[in-house]
Amino acid sequence: MTEHGSLPTDASDDKPDHVLRLLASETRRAVLQELRSEPSRSLDALADAVADSEGVSVESTERLCRRLHHCHLPRLETAGVCRYDPDESRVDYVGDETVEAVLSLLEE
């Protein structure tokens, strides 16, 4: 990881709440776990990896891919944690120190 994103905040007290809301989704946590291990992936490869980690059936992988595209990846990108290029179907992990700290705590 060469650079870190920064979650948008109006006040420093809002950042913990924003991070917790961002990580409240099991799917977003799985996406971040996968991107931490391989920071640049195609959308399809990321969906396959998340589906495997969540035990999603093969038929549902396409649905998961759509949810990632429309919901989860735009939210992670807005938070500055990843970059998502829908035209290239490419996801790149940027990271964030606070997000990293919370994910590490959740893994314990």
Image (cartoon, helix red, strand yellow):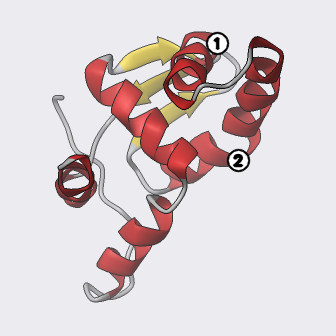
Secondary structure under tag 2 reads helix
* Image position, residue 76 (x, y; %): 50, 48
Q: Residue at x 60, y 25 (%)?
A: 55
Is any part of residue 8 visible from this angle? Answer: no
Q: Is the N terminus in the top left, top right, bottom left or bottom right quadrant? A: top left
Q: Amino acid at mark 2?
A: Cys
Relative vertical location of residue 92 with respect to residue 21 in this rendering, above or below: above
Nearest to N terminus: mark 1 or mark 2: 1
Secondary structure under tag 1 reads helix
Q: Residues within 10 Å of mark 1 (few under 14, many from 20)?
A: some
Relative placement, left or right, of 88 versus 39 is right
* Image position, residue 35 (x, y; %): 37, 27
Q: Residue at x 81, y 28 (%)?
A: 63
Q: Amino acid at mark 1?
A: Asp
The residue pinned by badge 2 equals 71
Relative placement, left or right, of 33 versus 69 is left
Q: Residue at x 22, y 44 (%)?
A: 4
Tell me the distance, in whole angstroms, between the alpha carbons under discs 1 and 2: 15 Å
The residue pinned by badge 1 equals 44
* Viewer-closest of 21 and 39: 21
Q: Residues within 10 Å of mark 2 (few under 14, many from 20)?
A: few
Q: Quadrant of residue 59?
A: top right
Relative vertical location of residue 36 with respect to residue 78 in this rendering, above or below: above
* Image position, residue 29 (x, y; %): 44, 45
Relative placement, left or right, of 30 versus 85 is left
Q: Quadrant of residue 72?
A: top right
